[in-house]
Amino acid sequence: MYGVEQGVGSFEKRFRYFVVAVKASLIGCFKSRKFTPYLYGLFAMLCIDRRPTNAILRMALASSLMISNGTVAFAHARDDASQSLELKIFGKVSPKCELSFSDDEADVVLTEQAGTTTLPFAVDCNQRMNVQMRSLNGGLQHVEVGREPRFNGFANFVPYTATFRIDVEGAREVSAESREMTSSARGNVGRIPFQSKGELNFAWAATPPLLGGQYRDVIEIRVSGY
C-alpha cells in the first residue's frame, strides 16, 4: 500500500510539473497573441482545477483543439494571406518627322556650262526616315515657251539631278534625275535624323545655248518615319 501511494504521489508530482510547463507555454502564446478562443478556455480550466484526472482530460481536450482548430486556422490564414495580380501597361509615342528650309526658293543664273546649287535644311525625326521627291516639270522649263524646242539651236529645258543628304553618320543619300521625279522618286536614309542638318543639292550638265527668259520647276519633298 505504501508503494502504491508513493507511486501515485510521484505521478501527481510529475504531472503537476507538466501542468506548470504547459501553462508557461500557454502564457507565452497569450503574450504573442497566437491564442485561439479554445486555448483561452483551456488556460482557464488548467488554472482552476489542478487535479490529475481532470488535468489529463483537459490536456487531451487541449491536444484535440490545437490540432483541429489552431493548426488548421493558421494554415488557412497562410493560404489566404497572399494574392497575385497581373497589370498590363501600354504606352505610345507619336511619330514625328519634320523638315524645314531656311529659304524655299533657289534663284540661280543658268548658262551653257554645268552648274550646281544647294539649299540647306533642318530635319527632326524620332524614327528612321523615308524621303519622297516629286518634280512638277521634270526639269527647269522655260516659263513662256514650255518644254518642247521651238527655236533651232536653242534649248529651253534644263534637266537636273536632285540629291537629298543629311549630316548623320552612316546615312544614305537619296538621289534622282528630274525626269524620273515626275512620277515621284523614293528612298530612305537608313538612320534617325534627330535634330539634324542637311542639304538638297541640284546639279545640271552643260547644255546648248539657252533661250533667254525665266526657267522654273517646283519640287515637293515629303519625309516620313518607318
Image (cartoon, helix red, strand yellow):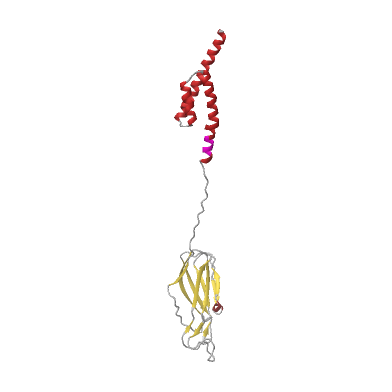
220 in relation to 33, above or below: below
Q: Looking at this rendering, what residue extends furthest in the top direction?
A: 2
Q: Which quarter of the image is occupied by the C terminus?
A: bottom right
Count of marks overlaid on the render: 0
Identify the residue shown where x is 50% and y is 22%: 21
192 in relation to 111, above or below: above
150 in relation to 88, above or below: below
Q: Is residue 63 visible?
A: yes
Image coords of residue 155 (percent x, y): 53, 87
Image coords of residue 182 (percent x, y): 54, 79
Magenta stretch, overall SS: helix
Identify the residue shown where x is 53% and y is 26%: 61
- Of residue 57 and residue 39, the one placed in the foreground of this image is 57
Say whether residue 76 is magenta.
yes
Q: Which quarter of the image is occupied by the N terminus?
A: top right
73 in relation to 61, above or below: below
- Of residue 5 and residue 94, the one placed in the foreground of this image is 5
Image coords of residue 62 (percent x, y): 52, 26
Identify the residue shown where x is 46% and y is 21%: 48
Q: Is residue 35 visible?
A: no
Image coords of residue 115 (percent x, y): 50, 79
Say whether residue 212 is magenta.
no
**What is the span of residues highlighted in magenta in the rendered image?**
73-78
